[in-house]
Image (cartoon, coloured by chain):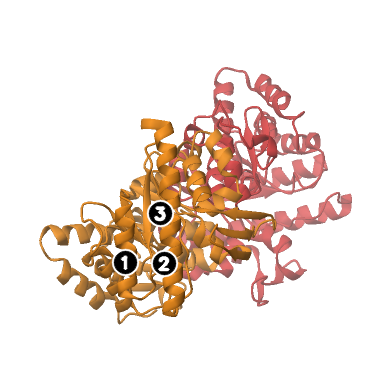
Chain colours: A orange, B red
Amino acid sequence: MKALRQEALEELGAGIILANTYHLYLRPGHELIRKLGGLHQFMAWNRAILTDSGGYQVFSLAELRKMTDEGVKFRSHLDGSEHLLTPEKAAEIQLALGSDIAMVLDECIETPAPREAAEAAMRRTTAWARRARNYFLQQQERAGADLAQWQFGIVQGATFADLRRESARQLVEMNFPGYAVGGLAVGEPHEVTCEMAAEATSELPVEKPRYLMGVGRPEQLADYVARGIDMMDCVLPTRAARHACLYTSEGRVLIKNSRYIEDQGPIDANCSCSVCKRYTRAYLRHLFAAGEITAAILASHHNVHFYLDIMRQIREAITFGQLTKFATELHARYDAKPA
Amino acid sequence: MKALRQEALEELGAGIILANTYHLYLRPGHELIRKLGGLHQFMAWNRAILTDSGGYQVFSLAELRKMTDEGVKFRSHLDGSEHLLTPEKAAEIQLALGSDIAMVLDECIETPAPREAAEAAMRRTTAWARRARNYFLQQQERAGADLAQWQFGIVQGATFADLRRESARQLVEMNFPGYAVGGLAVGEPHEVTCEMAAEATSELPVEKPRYLMGVGRPEQLADYVARGIDMMDCVLPTRAARHACLYTSEGRVLIKNSRYIEDQGPIDANCSCSVCKRYTRAYLRHLFAAGEITAAILASHHNVHFYLDIMRQIREAITFGQLTKFATELHARYDAKPA
């Protein structure tokens, strides 16, 4: 969580954070983190941690990737060193990190994908999930109650409904404690993302967590929840914050804009975060104009609060049976606003 | 205060901060800050603020400077625009900012300076101080009780004891509510800085604050206090922090060093700051290695705590009549440590 101390995340009420296995594997190394007592102890964070498999960053950051059924060979983007990431290795690294939720290695493909490629990637993902599950269960048997990690399978199948359902059914047979839906929100229309999420969750047990990976924009969150999604992760709130884009109940505020030079109001008059209680838009704008680190700190704090608050509102809407209405409201609030 | 929210400064017990007049004059502009209710309101900081005159940054950052008896002409380092800073203008800008303590414009010269140049700069500084004082008193007469700012004169005179004393005496005649000693710690040996501070304070009223500008290293702070100095300012704690240099009771810790890779101790076992209570050296090292903003946040927090704690220890030492002993201890603690 860039630009936020753990104390800030606690103040914000964050119950879980995501750590990138690829980055931690390369630097400082999972064996070092294991030696230092695991990721919770290393980073002084007592709440939940989810680790990804490392696969996504291999596809987006690493060089000279080579995919085989065994796994994916790549060169580190830091020093060019060669590595092989297999389903077993991804599970092993995450066990060393000691995260609460670990993801299986999956194959991400670019979209739009032809059906043949989508099916091949889905089948490889399923085969890898089986290997990861077997590896994990062996380790768990050895370690006993000490190994409290939850391993999640990942549904693939690109934009093909039947592939998504088949992928989900095969994973459910492996009896994961939770399931993710991967390879979405990578360029396809929002309606397609929603449809594929719905296809996947229709086959996933409702009593287990269902996690849509890498989403999303504020106005989309309730749509996913309405399709049965319980968990999401996204860089958007913090990345947008560092680029001076603030989320508010009135839409996005591009705070560097000169219209905010004399604006003595808070970022969001309807926000209860500690930044909105104290600082003005004019001050935030100045900090960004001057390139101050505190601009990133304050903006990240607000945006994360905003996202967590939307999730609180979604839970409340569910309680009162108003989820669909709330989802429509969110779109009305944001769709027409400047990008 | 880079990388620290105002909340952090309050937690650290900072009673006063320094704001740079040059930077604020150019961006966002002193008239804007005046319009928005002054600097306290603009930056949401209710404790004390000291503003410098802007002169130092004109000398160190601006382009095409031209000094005359009238003032200093310069071009903005941001957009090349031309400006004239006079003693009256520097006072006017700081009145607009609404700081609690404002500094008169002085002439800083490079050291070592020949006596002739030092004397000329000192005489110009004194003449400017008189103009600044007159301007300020006129404004105060107009504004009445509303103008609660304290204006400080600045002693110059390079490394010449008699010039320092003469400068101080002339300023005292102008009856400032506080006095600064400027143009020191710019390359001369520490002993000379101390000697010049002592020469200046010997002529300055003990019941008014005496401020040594732009110092210093941790082990030097008590030396200055022993020479009658009450206030200091320095970028060192935060700048060093951003460059991974941490101050501790055992000396400086260059946290990027590989010896800290597995170090599960706090930055400083004798430190009570919130960073040392929670995070390890290994984690801090990792954050710096990964180029994370949180590295700057945590390191700045600790270093500022360290500096404020030295000042607390100095006050305690004074209470018990142990200041000289404490100053010697500080040198023993730090002088032999890696730079």
SS for tag 2?
A: helix
Residue A132 position, x and y percent, is 44, 50
Chain under callout 3: B
| Disc number placed over residue B145 in the picture, else none | 3
Residue at (77, 52) in percent of width and height: B122
| Disc number placed over residue A166 in the picture, else none | 1
Residue B44 vs residue B67: left or right?
Answer: left
| Disc number placed over residue A122 in the picture, else none | 2
> Marks 2 and 1: CB-CB under 8 Å?
yes
SS for tag 1?
A: helix
Task: Measure how far apart labels 2 and 1 are at the Cα level.
Answer: 9 Å
Amino acid type at image mark 2: Met
- Is A215 above or below relative to B204? below
Residue B297 visible in the snapshot: yes
| In this view, the mark in front (3 or 2) | 2
- Is B326 above or below relative to B263? above
Chain under callout 1: A
Q: Quadrant of residue B207?
A: top right
> Marks 3 and 2: CB-CB under 8 Å?
no
Front position in the image: A217 or A92:
A92
SS for tag 3?
A: helix
Residue B50 visible in the snapshot: no
